[in-house]
């Protein structure tokens, strides 16, 4: 059938992933660093993804396309919600995803020795995709949601941001996933005292910030939060 549907100009796409996050139907995926309309029957033609595109790479066009399949969209949404509600790796799964909590009380009280860095990572796993939505280390904690690259770009990441916080990390561009649902569950279902979001200045990190902000709103809680942006050369911009 001929109908209105989105068109993505790959030449203009910078791979930020904001359109994929904005598309509630799940019609857009990030493929090789570019946004692609991979499920034409999931695109309703309303264009929720257009305002999220900073480069103007998304437009409307009328062409031959499969009919919008609302039933398939709802089934896919339900499947994603069910997956997000379950632990990433149940007992007997990947050993590298097994939960651990580290006793850092004495180390946190002591200053770092000059010339010897001290790890401030308080738990394992730390990747958002691997974390359960409920865990003892979330109770009463200050939460740090950080982009993967920040620890490499900012030299004092452990002392200034990770110390005294539970650190969870991710990259919306490489993970190719919207973290909103999982972050919402973590904030909603645990006693989180505050949230700090540390991102890089690059556009694709906007997906992490947006997911965290949406999660804070969706959680129904009023929690102090802040966003810190790190430049590519390792400086705090704001």
Image: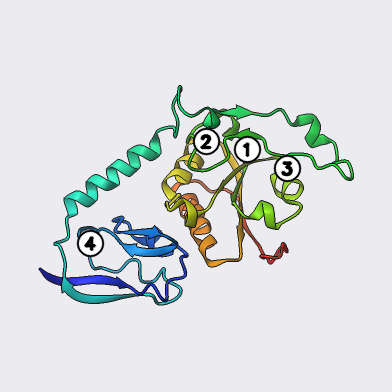
Residue 218: x percent and y percent? 43, 49
**Which is more foreground, mark 2 or mark 4?**
4
Cα separation between marks 2 and 1: 9 Å
Residue located 60% across and 28% down the image: 100
Label annotation for residue 190: 2
Cα separation between marks 3 and 1: 11 Å
Q: Reading the chain from its start, which is encountered first: label 2 or label 1?
A: 1
Foreground of the two, 200 or 115: 115
Q: Reading the chain from its start, which is encountered first: label 3 or label 2?
A: 3
Residue 200: x percent and y percent? 61, 61
Q: Reading the chain from its start, which is encountered first: label 3 or label 4?
A: 4
Cα separation between marks 3 and 4: 46 Å
Label annotation for residue 141: 1
Circles 2 and 1, Cβ within 8 Å, touching? The answer is yes
**Which is more foreground, mark 3 or mark 2?**
3
Circles 4 and 1, Cβ within 8 Å, touching? The answer is no
Location of residue 165 with respect to 44 vertically, above or below:
above
Cα separation between marks 4 and 1: 42 Å
Circles 3 and 2, Cβ within 8 Å, touching? The answer is no
Label annotation for residue 63: none
Question: Which residue in the protein does label 3 denote?
Answer: 163
Label annotation for residue 40: 4
Location of residue 105 with respect to 204 vertically, above or below:
above
């Amino acid at each position: 059938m001929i109908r209105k549907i989105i068109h993505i100009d790959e030449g203009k796409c910078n791979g930020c992933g904001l359109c994929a996050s904005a598309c509630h139907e799940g019609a857009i995926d990030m493929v090789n660093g570019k946004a692609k309309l991979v499920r034409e029957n999931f695109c309703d033609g309303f264009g929720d993804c257009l305002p999220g595109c900073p480069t103007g790479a998304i437009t409307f066009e009328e062409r031959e396309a499969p009919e919008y399949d609302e039933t398939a969209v709802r089934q896919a949404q339900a499947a994603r919600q069910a997956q997000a509600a379950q632990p990433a790796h149940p007992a007997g799964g990947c050993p590298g995803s097994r939960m651990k909590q580290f006793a850092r009380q004495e180390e946190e009280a002591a200053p770092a020795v000059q010339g010897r860095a001290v790890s401030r990572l308080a738990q394992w796993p730390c990747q958002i995709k691997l974390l359960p939505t409920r865990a003892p280390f979330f109770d009463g904690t200050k939460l740090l949601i950080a982009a993967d690259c920040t620890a490499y770009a900012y030299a004092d990441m452990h002392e200034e941001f990770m110390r005294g916080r539970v650190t969870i990390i991710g990259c919306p561009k490489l993970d190719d996933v919207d973290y909103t649902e999982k972050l919402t569950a973590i904030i909603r279902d645990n006693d989180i005292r505050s949230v700090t979001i540390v991102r890089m200045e690059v556009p694709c990190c906007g997906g992490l910030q947006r997911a965290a902000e949406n999660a804070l709103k969706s959680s129904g809680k009023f929690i102090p939060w802040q966003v810190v942006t790190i430049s590519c050369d390792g400086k705090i911009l704001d």
